[in-house]
Image: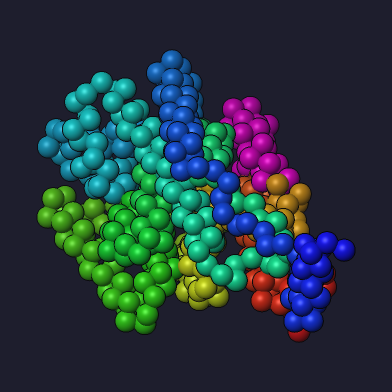
Amino acid sequence: MSAGSKRGGDALVDALRSGRSAEPKRANAPVWTARAESKQLAYVLLLGSMLRLGLLLLFPDLTQRWLAGRVELSTPVTSFKRLAEGLHLSARGISPYDGGVFHQSPLLLLVFRPLYYLPDAAMSVAFVAADALVALGLAKLAGARAAQLQRSAGTAVPGETRFICRPSVAAMLYLFNPLAIATALARSTIVFSHAAIVGALYLGTQGLITGAVVCAAVATHLSLYPAMLIAPIALMAGSGRGIVRTVIMFACTIGMLHVLFVAIYGAEYFAATVDFTVRVGDLQPTVGLFWYFFIEIFDEFRAFFIVVFQLTALAFAVPVAWRFRHDPLFAATMLVGIISALKSYPAWGDLALFLGLLPVYEDLLKYLQYTFLSANLLLYGIGLAPVFWYLWIEQGSGNANFFYAATLVYVFGQIALLFDLGSAMLRRSLDIHHPETRNRTVIQD
């Protein structure tokens, strides 16, 4: 026996005696280089942006007249047509909230007011740029989590081969998602809220809590429900004092923005934006649960069920954040999915953001047990909604029940995916800390 073989055999015996595995260590480092990955990411962002901008400029009838009016893509609080009405009133010295049409944040008026006097293509560029920022933020989140997994010990199941999603792939999966493309082509203002959400999550993971709080406050003023994300962002601050300081900072930022908007547009903006969203002032059909229920409910019970429906979404913020406190970014991902399913005015763009966050947790995908069910429910809901809308509104051969049935399937698909994703995280955590249970079925008493 050679000396090398003898040393290898001795190492094997020593490993067996000490209870350690003689299996060679698996490299968890990303296999890509930073320069090559940055180049690919730039190509993906450029290609996705050019696709959107090209469709917006080459097919204005498709985008501005058809997609912009789709209830699956635009809602009363994200519609570009309503934004244009608000800008038109504001440019003529009239309060944009007087007409009862505009229900979006004054932040959008401040952003788009200079673009109002430019050609329409300038506004299209703004929407494309916001969507590109969302994709860039998702890529940064994927890269940050890959680096965190590389630095941290005890984040892998012993003996597994880990696959980490490349940042350029995360950006590509979002940019070329048909739901995200359709949302950008409809010029739904939800993309600006999504950009602020992704910015808040990325800054929070980098320890820049002040910037994360500002982005979360901006997203809250744009869409209200991102206020739920302050719970996981506060956990990113670390200590108990940091959590309290983060919540206080968030409340102060929200208050400062409110005072600024009152000074510019008057107190009526609050009733036309936040209060409008909470009380569901416009029962235009959406892909959510609210509109049909509140059409059918008696007026004397309306206030009670508004509280019930709104608390159903908001009540998840603290429990979900605390249950997954070891990974606040995952808690935020779960809350983004909950917001997409349970907000008062949801759209397909909300689901696009939730699906865009999933590649950041690529290691959880193999733990999902009901992927086929969730995918089919979502595909059926998305595919049937335009068909049933056509039968109801265009042909008159259907009714509201048809379209609402499609939305129920769509929402149930999101909820099924949320439950599956949460279970996957819990199962993976169990496998990491108790690898002996990997091949066992766990039943909770």
Query: Does residue 261 appear to the left or right of 307 in the view shown?
Result: left
**Residue name at image x 46 percent, y 55 percent:** 144
Query: Does residue 104 appear to the left or right of 25 in the view shown?
Result: left
Q: In this view, does 282 lie above or below 188?
A: below
- Pick the quarter of the image with the C terminus: bottom right
In magenta, the rendered stretch is: 376-403
Q: Where is residue 382 in the image (x, y as percent from the top left)?
A: 63, 40
Q: In this view, does 187 lie above or below 306?
A: above
Q: In this view, does 386 lie above or below 154?
A: above
Q: Main secondary structure of the magenta part?
A: helix
Q: Position of residue 2 (x, y in %)?
A: 83, 61
The answer to whether one can see residue 250 in this image is yes
Q: Which quadrant of the view contains residue 231? A: bottom left
Residue placed most toward the observer, 406 or 149: 149
**Residue name at image x 29 percent, y 67 percent:** 250
Q: Where is residue 310 in the image (x, y as percent from the top left)?
A: 47, 65
**Residue name at image x 31 percent, y 62 percent:** 208
- Pick the quarter of the image with the N terminus: bottom right
Residue projecting furthest to the top: 58
**Residue name at image x 46 percent, y 43 percent:** 34
Q: Disc count in the image?
A: 0
The answer to whether one can see residue 405 in this image is no
Scheme of image coloration:
rainbow
